[in-house]
Image: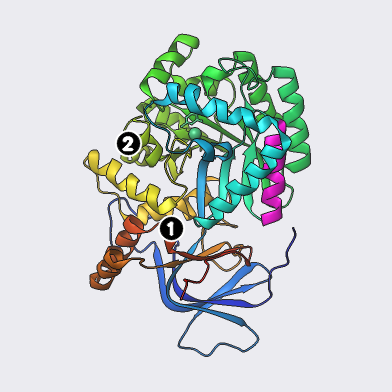
């Protein structure tokens, strides 16, 4: 339902965002903009500025007092699967068996329009309730799954990038399309949804093994014919998968090269995982301006590997952070960032809260070409904003109370917070999530 944003809304809290990319490893960073106890001013769905709470607020503002809470730009989840809430936390498999055993059967249900519609609403409401206000999403192979997701995104006013999955081989009955029908379906979806409000289409190649070379070429044509559409896929997630791709595409230099040859490596490309890439692949990603959607919780849960964030950064490749639910175990970006820290620790690196949070807000926005709209608390940005408790529960409260430096406080928050910390979420200035008051 279209809801007009309240005019002149002021939110009081501790404002945190970024004005540049933090330097890897720095815990004191000039890229961090921290404005403790300020009013964030929102008019007509856009941020118009901020002022210290100590200065009197003009009474024309509708004031919402969240003092003592943290106010961040809404998180951007750059890789997540809407139908996979049904298989989150499924036991005992690595990627290829996990797809066959759990994921494909669940995705088949989305052929049913009623199931797809209910699933889209459930999924987007869950994202928002975890503090994620923008997302790059895999629907299923069924056109109706993308249609219903776009409609649900529009109803919530979200910046949503999604598309129908392309998959014409190595998938069970009920989950395969074919090149011609898929091209017609994608073209129709692009015509009706791409650039409609805050919605964008993503040509969605599941991964190289489930598309014929003809289908990959068709996907490349779609990207060329419709400038501005995104492209999302998986790459180099799991070593068995990488070996399979090498068997299926012996002519390609690498897994990434399969996509490059099909015209799918471009600045609008969002490549999930990228664990088993080499320097040549990273140079190609950098040259194309494509990004890696790093999915730490998924990589740990499916035992896929430890992503080399430092090498990607050194090669100049943009890295954003993604939940990859249902391979991942939480829609919560803070939970995923806590896992990202642990993945880097296993590699002997120390991920700062600044690099982590930047990758989930301003960094992701810039990599998507949407830095003017989302990912910051800049004046002029759309007011996608979340209000968080600094701590919930006795342990986190004690940790917060003894933290002194800003990075210490924010790192403890990132490591300990989850959806229970979320007090409110605003999308384009409209309150879309409000935590229920605690029972007396
Ligand atoms: N590779 C191909 N499909 C999928 C999927 O649904 N999830 C993950 N994590 N990897 C994939
Ligand atoms: Zn995925």
What's the residue at 69%, 17% (across, down)?
Answer: 178
Relative placement, left or right, of 174 versus 389 is right
Q: Is residue 332 above or below residue 9?
A: above
Q: Nearer the viewer, residue 380 or 73?
A: 73
Horizontal and vertical percent for residue 110? 65, 33
What's the residue at 31%, 34% (across, down)?
Answer: 306
Q: Nearer the viewer, mark 2 or mark 1?
A: 2
Q: Look at the numbered disc 1 and give the secondary structure of its residue.
A: loop
Q: Quadrant of the N terminus?
A: bottom right
Q: Nearer the viewer, residue 138 or 19?
A: 138
Disc 2 to disc 1, C-alpha distance: 22 Å
What's the residue at 33%, 50% (across, down)?
Answer: 338
Span highlighted in magenta in the image: 143-156
User: Which tag, 2 or 1, sits closer to the chain's start?
Assistant: 1
Residue 37 placement: quadrant: bottom left
Q: Can residue 133 be seen from the camera position used here?
A: no
Residue 59 placement: quadrant: bottom right
Crowd around label 1: few <14 · some 14–19 · many ≥20 (10 Å): some
* Residue for badge 1: 20
- Counting every numbered tag in the picture gives 2
Q: Are marks 2 and 1 in contact (CB under 8 Å)?
A: no
Q: Look at the numbered disc 2 and give the secondary structure of its residue.
A: loop
Relative placement, left or right, of 241 versus 152 is left
Q: Can residue 154 be found in the magenta stretch?
A: yes
* Residue for badge 2: 308
């Amino acid at each position: 339902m279209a809801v007009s944003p309240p005019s002149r809304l002021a939110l009081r809290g501790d404002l945190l965002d970024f004005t540049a990319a933090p330097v890897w490893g720095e815990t004191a960073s000039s890229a961090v903009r921290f404005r403790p106890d300020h009013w964030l001013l929102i008019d007509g769905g856009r941020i118009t500025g901020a002022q210290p709470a100590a200065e009197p607020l003009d009474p024309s503002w509708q004031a919402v007092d969240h003092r003592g809470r943290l106010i961040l730009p809404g998180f951007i989840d750059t890789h997540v699967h809407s139908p996979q809430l049904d298989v989150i936390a499924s036991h005992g498999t690595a990627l290829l068996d996990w797809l066959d055993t759990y994921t494909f059967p669940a995705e088949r249900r989305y052929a049913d329009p009623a199931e797809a519609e209910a699933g889209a609403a459930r999924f987007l409401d869950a994202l928002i309730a975890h503090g994620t206000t923008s997302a790059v999403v895999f629907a299923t192979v069924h056109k109706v799954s993308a249609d219903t997701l776009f409609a649900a995104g529009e109803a919530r006013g979200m910046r949503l990038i999604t598309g129908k999955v392309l998959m014409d081989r190595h998938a069970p009955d009920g989950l395969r399309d074919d090149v011609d029908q898929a091209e017609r379906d994608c073209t129709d979806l692009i015509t009706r949804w791409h650039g409609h409000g805050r919605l964008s289409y993503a040509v969605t190649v599941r991964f190289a093994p489930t598309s014929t070379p003809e289908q990959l070429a068709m996907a490349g044509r779609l990207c060329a014919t419709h400038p501005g559409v995104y492209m999302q896929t998986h790459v180099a997630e799991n070593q068995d998968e990488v070996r399979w791709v090498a068997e299926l595409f012996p002519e390609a230099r690498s897994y990434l090269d399969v996509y490059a040859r099909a015209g799918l490596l471009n600045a609008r490309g969002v490549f999930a995982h990228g664990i088993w890439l080499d320097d040549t692949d990273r140079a190609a990603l950098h040259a194309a301006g494509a990004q890696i959607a790093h999915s730490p919780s998924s990589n740990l849960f499916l035992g896929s590997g430890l992503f080399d964030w430092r090498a990607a950064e050194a090669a100049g490749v943009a890295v954003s952070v993604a939940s990859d639910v249902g391979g991942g175990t939480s829609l919560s970006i803070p939970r995923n960032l806590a896992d990202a820290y642990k993945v880097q620790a296993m590699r002997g690196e120390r991920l700062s809260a600044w690099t982590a949070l930047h990758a989930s807000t301003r960094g992701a926005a810039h990599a998507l070409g949407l830095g003017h709209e989302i990912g910051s608390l800049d004046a002029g940005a759309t007011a996608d904003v979340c209000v968080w408790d600094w701590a919930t529960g006795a342990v986190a409260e004690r940790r917060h109370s003894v933290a002194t430096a800003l990075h210490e406080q924010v790192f403890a928050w990132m490591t300990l917070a989850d959806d229970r910390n979320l007090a409110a979420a605003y999308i384009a200035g409209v309150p879309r999530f409000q935590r229920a008051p605690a029972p007396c």
